[in-house]
């Protein structure tokens, strides 16, 4: 029984992917449109892209910007969010600022940032940074706010100073929530990475994609979509592994099925 | 705050038990007003004055909501009273410190630490070497009956087990004063009795000062030198009763002791009376 359930859990994502590709294949065959290649055609184009040195350099450049933008955003946002969660003054200062930035699509800021910083790496990395920061700040803030007061009191009684309590109690206690924010941030990093390269074409995975679109190479366009999608799945899977390991102590104990049939 | 010379332990050292014990904690006309969400003031504690002698075991008994926890928080330095002062060894209590170890009603364990990690936290913070802290912590974990659970996380423990970890965690850093908020409330009768005995043994050995909140009259009489009876709305001290029973106390002897029985019956009757008075007013 247990083994069966585990098998189903493992097979489910693979089945989902195959199902999606099958639907795509059938839809493309039915529509017979030049700009809508079949799944098999798109998959065939994948090795061409990954085998091409130029493309590979582009994709790696994208990933590098994404890693830097994400990393810096996390390093800045977690402390800021935690401080906001534990200090009303800090929260009162930053909340309005964040509320102004939150609803603005980060890609919409691109043209302005490009005017200031050019179309290079800095602009794109900055946009990724902005995209990742907000969810991480928000979740760190919520996580820090929810830390049980008596836990902090216990720490204080043991002699932990306020700064130590922030690092050694608030941070670990809020970690599950923080990591939820980071996961959202990771997806947003991927999205802003591509959109930033759509606006500032120069290099990157988005560049390949949108150049191919301009030239009507639809196989390549859809192959790039597959590659970006696969990157998303892989990054998320890796992140989930790390997350599960870091917050094993907080995972729910029991599955609560909706029915016991 | 003026220190009464006779109470200062600088020159009057309590060498034998005959000498008068010196006050370690003094609570002087402490009141606590809470702002409720309905924007009304709520008087949780009203003019509480209480002196706790060094090495004394003092229990606080009272109905739910009479401010027992709040009083403990004030002594712990976690809550600043609205008015009045609380002092420890003549110094105004300005905040928490390792001289006062709380055991909270809600346990407040660190969920990301194992049982061992929780118990070792205090000693490590005080700079005790890892190996030594671990050895001491393992001994404490065994004492509270959790041997074999060292590597469990709090979410993997039952309520009573968490409570015992919380107790061990606080004992581990050797506070002079223990502030215990219904530490045995979630335990079965058997474990409760065992831990009461263990606590008494520790107390008789180290002569820590204990401020102990409980709902149980038996427990209060069995453990304490002094029982502070509180009444509700506003939280007030109704009466302070000295429990004049010999130590060391053995549970099986004490239960048969008519003096013990009288204390229990008297205290229970006083609570019944206040209930009746409360229902009339
Ligand atoms: N933070 C707070 N804000 C508002 N009111 C509070 C707060 N904390 C406690 N109170 C009020 O103060 C009173 C005393 O609370 P306290 O927790 O000290 O009671 P208690 O004697 O420990 O009760 P119990 O035996 O149920 O633990 C209660 O009426 C409660 O509603
Ligand atoms: Mg209470």
Image (cartoon, rainbow, N blue to C red):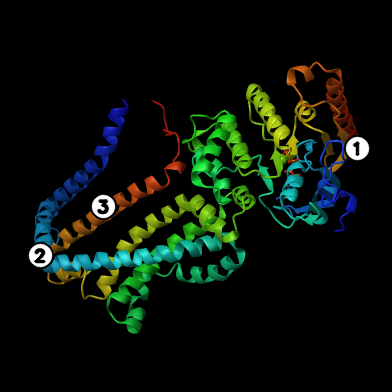
**Residue A167 position in % (x across, y down):** 51, 57
- Chain of the residue where label 3 is placed in the rendered structure: A
* Residue at figure coordinates x 19%, y 44% from the top left: A18
A195 vs B206, nearest the viewer:
B206
Label 3, label 1: how far apart the Cα atoms are: 70 Å
Q: Residue B227 carries which label?
A: none
Residue that lies at the very extreme toward the top in this rendered image? B256
Q: Quadrant of residue B61?
A: top right
B115 vs A171, nearest the viewer:
B115
**Residue B18 position in % (x across, y down):** 87, 36
**Residue pointed to by mark 2:** A52
Quadrant of image for the C terminus of chain A: top left
**Residue pointed to by mark 3:** A234
Quadrant of image for the N terminus of chain A: top left
Please tell me in which quarter of the rendered image ligand 2 is found: top right
A177 vs A194, left or right, is: right
**Residue pointed to by mark 1:** B281
Query: What secondary structure is marked by label 3?
Result: helix
Binning the other alpha carbons within 10 Å of mark 3 as few (below 14), some (14 to 19) or many (20 upward) gives few
Which of label 3 and label 1 is nearer to you? 3
Work out whether B69 lies above or below A44.
above
**Residue A218 position in % (x across, y down):** 13, 63
Q: Is residue B112 visible?
A: no
């Amino acid at each position: 029984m247990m083994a069966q359930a585990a098998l189903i859990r493992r097979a489910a994502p693979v089945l989902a992917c195959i199902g999606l590709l099958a639907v795509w294949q059938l839809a493309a065959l039915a529509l017979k449109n030049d700009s809508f290649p079949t799944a098999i055609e798109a998959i065939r184009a994948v090795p061409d892209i990954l085998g091409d040195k130029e493309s590979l350099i582009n994709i790696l450049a994208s990933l590098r910007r994404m890693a830097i933008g994400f990393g810096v955003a996390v390093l800045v946002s977690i402390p800021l969010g935690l401080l906001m969660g534990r200090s009303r003054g800090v929260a009162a200062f930053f909340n309005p600022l964040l509320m102004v930035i939150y609803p603005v699509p980060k890609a919409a800021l691109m043209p302005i940032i490009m005017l200031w910083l050019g179309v290079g790496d800095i602009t794109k990395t900055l946009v990724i940074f902005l995209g990742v920061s907000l969810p991480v700040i928000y979740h760190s803030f919520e996580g820090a706010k929810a830390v049980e007061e008596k836990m902090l009191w216990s720490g204080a009684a043991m002699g932990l100073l306020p700064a130590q309590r922030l690092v050694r109690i608030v941070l670990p206690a809020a970690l599950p929530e923080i990591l939820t924010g980071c996961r959202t941030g990771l997806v947003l990093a991927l999205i802003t990475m591509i959109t930033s390269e759509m606006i500032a074409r120069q290099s990157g995975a988005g560049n390949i994609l949108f150049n191919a679109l301009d030239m009507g190479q639809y196989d390549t366009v859809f192959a790039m979509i597959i590659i970006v999608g696969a990157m998303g799945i892989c990054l998320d899977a890796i992140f989930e592994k790390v997350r599960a390991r870091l917050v094993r102590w907080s995972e729910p104990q029991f599955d609560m099925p909706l029915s016991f049939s | 705050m003026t220190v009464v010379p006779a109470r200062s332990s600088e020159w009057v050292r309590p060498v034998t038990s005959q000498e008068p014990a010196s006050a370690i904690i003094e609570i002087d006309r402490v009141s606590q007003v809470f702002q409720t969400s309905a924007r009304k003031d709520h008087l949780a504690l009203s003019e509480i004055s209480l002196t706790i002698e060094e090495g004394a075991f003092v229990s606080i008994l009272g109905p739910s909501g009479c401010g027992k926890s709040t009083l403990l928080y004030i002594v712990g330095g976690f809550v600043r009273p609205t008015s009045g002062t609380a002092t420890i060894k003549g110094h105004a209590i300005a905040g928490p410190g390792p001289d006062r170890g709380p055991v909270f009603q809600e346990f407040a364990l660190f969920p990301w630490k194992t049982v061992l990690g929780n118990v070792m936290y205090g000693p490590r913070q005080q700079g005790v070497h890892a190996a030594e802290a671990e050895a001491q912590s393992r001994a404490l974990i065994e004492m509270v009956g959790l041997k074999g659970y060292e590597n469990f996380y709090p979410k993997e423990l039952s309520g009573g087990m968490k409570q015992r970890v919380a107790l061990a965690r606080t004992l581990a850093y050797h506070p002079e004063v223990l502030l215990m908020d219904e530490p045995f409330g979630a335990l079965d009768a058997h474990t409760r009795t065992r831990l009461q005995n263990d606590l008494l043994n520790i107390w008789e050995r180290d002569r820590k000062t204990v401020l102990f909140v409980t709902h149980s009259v038996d427990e209060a009489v069995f453990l304490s030198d002094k029982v502070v009876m509180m009444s509700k709305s506003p939280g007030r001290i109704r009466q302070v009763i000295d429990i004049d029973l010999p130590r060391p106390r053995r549970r099986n002897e004490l239960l048969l002791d008519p003096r013990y029985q009288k204390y229990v019956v008297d205290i229970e009757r006083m609570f019944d009376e206040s209930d009746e008075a409360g229902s009339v007013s």
